[in-house]
Image: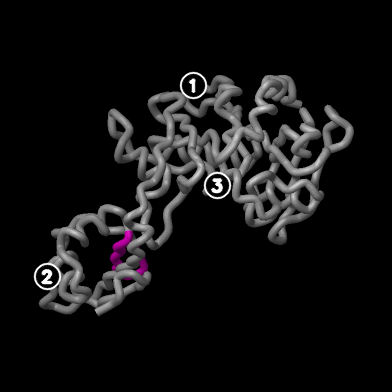
Amino acid sequence: MPNFQTPFELHIRVGAATGTINETLAGATGLSKTRLKQVMQKGAVWLSQGRQTKRVRRTKKIPPTGSIIHLYYNEALLDQAPPAPKLIADEDLYSIWEKPCGLLSQGSKWGDHHNIHRWVEQHHQPQKPAFIVHRLDRATRGLMIVAHSKKVAVAFSRQLQTRAIGKYYLAVVHGHFPATNKTGFYKTPLHGRSALTEVKPLQYDPIRNYSLMWVRIHTGRKHQIRLHLSEAGYPIVGDRLYGQDDNRHDLQLTAYKLAFTCPVEQIDQAYQLSPDLIMTPKRDDDLRRLDGKLQLADTCDL
């Protein structure tokens, strides 16, 4: 039997006499049916039929002969309680949410209960299907669009492809960014693809040697803002991947504003977090001194 404390995966080809997926996995692993029901609900069980592989959540489903059941079991991940996002606006066919640090934008083969679209599907009232439109890093807080129909999700995806959705951020970085109120651009290619990040310093704290930055991304590369600012010598406070070893703070990067044309009503829309919700120190109030001028970001949509 597998060691349940250690993540493992199991792949079972279905024979003619196989029972339900739940029964099959219980017999193969020693996990209880109750536990496996939880595991299936959290998206860690998949079924391959022909060329298709999909998550399966119905415990009483009897898999066809020749199909393959996949179990991806990570006990620590499955038992993790995801932080709840906050509803900012419900526009019927899409909604705007504030994603907290620690909540994922999408799931993996190991489960999807800790990502925003699954959380919205399970908790939003009235219940609706949820489709991811864009992504934020796990450690990044801020605004996200969740579509509630495939048609609207496709429409938003087209806007993303044509760079028609304005995505604005605020970041607290280490160091003194020179030339306050002067806009700059970073164009270093990332992951073999072009990338463009627009930045503007708003305020400097000489005591902590922190700068508050307004940021707009014109492309959507993985870790784009974090990489461009780090390569420039101004890593984001709390960035333990590309920055300094500072465990006092969560990543001080917030997607504070979204602007786009509503794909339903065809009118311009903009959603923005309140200034007092933007920067969140983890263990002390080192960053609170920056809160006083966050309203400056409202004037920086260039």
Could you say where residue 291 lies in the image, as x and y percent from the top left?
65, 25
- The residue that disc 2 covers is 19
Q: Earlier in the sequence, mark 3 or mark 2?
A: 2
Secondary structure under the numbered disc 3 in the rendered image: loop
Q: Which mark is residue 265?
A: 1
Within-10-Å neighbours for mark 2: few <14, some 14–19, many 20+: some
Front position among marks 3 and 2: 3
Q: Quadrant of the N terminus?
A: bottom left
Report the Cα–Cα distance between label 1 and label 2.
Answer: 49 Å
Q: Residue at position x 35%, y 73% from top?
A: 8
Question: Does residue 270 show up?
Answer: no
Could you say where residue 102 lies in the image, as x and y percent from the top left?
48, 46
Residue 226 inside the magenta-drawn segment? no
Against 245, is 177 above or below?
A: above
Could you say where residue 135 lies in the image, as x and y percent from the top left?
54, 45
| In the image: residue 292, left or right of residue 76 | right
Identify which amino acid the numbered label 2 is placed on.
Gly
Tell me whether the residue at label 1 lies in contact with that at label 3, contact meaning CB atoms closer than 8 angstroms.
no
| In the image: residue 232, left or right of residue 298 | right
Report the Cα–Cα distance between label 1 and label 3.
Answer: 33 Å
Q: Residue at position x 38%, y 40% from top?
A: 130
